Image: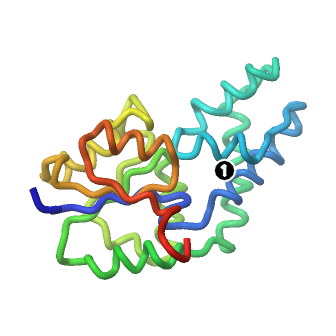
């Protein structure tokens, strides 16, 4: 089946935001006496923070009020959103297919932050739908976010191509039966 739709992850795929997310979490978690290793954080790329941060806190024996910590993290992240840049090779792919193929964003991020990032790099209106962590119960590496994007686009999963930067997202695309591109393997990314 030929490709009828493109589905893009947001953080680390369309926007160069992963370091900003890491720094915001690192700085907030220090108040709880928790250390956040950068590589450990990136290893869980694509999985919602609601799942990752409490797991990492438990591993360190830290009691954490996730909702309170998350509010502080989101404020810290939004204060630096003006520094975010698009990942040009991936944005060019989206731009070249705009109006020719159906397109969606499917992210493990929260809706407000995903929307703000896409607006900041001025591509928010390129996508027919945007699926975020609030839209599915299960998250990457489970395929639900990609399957929901395909459902909303009205395209069979086998006719979708996913652009991703994280292992969890690539596994989710594989489980969804979708073609995928690991953007980390693209020249210039």
Quadrant position of residue 48: top right
* 186 lies left or right of 151: right
Q: Residue at x 41, y 75 (%)?
A: 123
Looking at the rendered image, the quarter that the N terminus falls into is bottom left
- Height in image: 37 above or below 181? above
Q: Residue at x 57, y 46 (%)?
A: 45
Judge the density around disc 1: few (<14), some (14-19), many (≥20) Cα neighbours within 10 Å.
Answer: some
* 15 lies left or right of 178: right
Q: Secondary structure at mark 1?
A: helix
For the residue pair 132 and 91, the one nearer the viewer reads as 91
Looking at the rendered image, the quarter that the C terminus falls into is bottom right
- Height in image: 91 above or below 41? below
Residue 83 drawn at (x, y percent): 69, 73
Q: Which residue is mark 1?
A: 74
Residue 25 drawn at (x, y percent): 74, 45
Q: Residue at x 27, y 58 (%)?
A: 161
* 145 lies left or right of 83: left
Q: How many marks?
A: 1
Q: Residue at x 65, y 67 (%)?
A: 81
Quadrant position of residue 16: bottom right
Residue 133 drawn at (x, y percent): 45, 41
For the residue pair 78 and 93, the one nearer the viewer reads as 93
* 109 lies left or right of 68: left
């Amino acid at each position: 089946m030929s490709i009828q739709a493109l589905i893009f992850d947001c953080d680390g795929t369309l926007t160069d935001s992963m370091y900003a997310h890491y720094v915001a979490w690192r700085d907030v978690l220090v108040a709880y006496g928790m250390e956040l290793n950068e590589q450990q954080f990136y290893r869980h790329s694509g999985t919602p923070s609601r799942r990752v941060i409490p797991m990492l806190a438990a591993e360190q024996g830290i009691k954490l009020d996730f909702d309170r910590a998350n509010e502080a993290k989101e404020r810290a992240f939004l204060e630096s959103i003006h520094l975010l840049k698009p990942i040009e090779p991936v944005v060019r792919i989206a731009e070249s297919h705009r109006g020719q193929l159906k397109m969606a964003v499917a992210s493990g991020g929260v809706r407000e932050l995903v929307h703000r990032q896409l607006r900041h790099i001025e591509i928010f209106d390129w996508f027919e739908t945007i699926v975020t962590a609030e839209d599915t119960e299960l998250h990457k590496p489970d395929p639900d976010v990609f399957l929901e994007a395909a459902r909303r686009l009205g395209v069979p999963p086998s006719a979708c191509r996913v652009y991703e930067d994280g292992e969890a997202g690539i596994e989710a695309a594989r489980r969804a039966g979708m073609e995928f591109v690991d953007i980390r393997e693209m020249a210039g990314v």
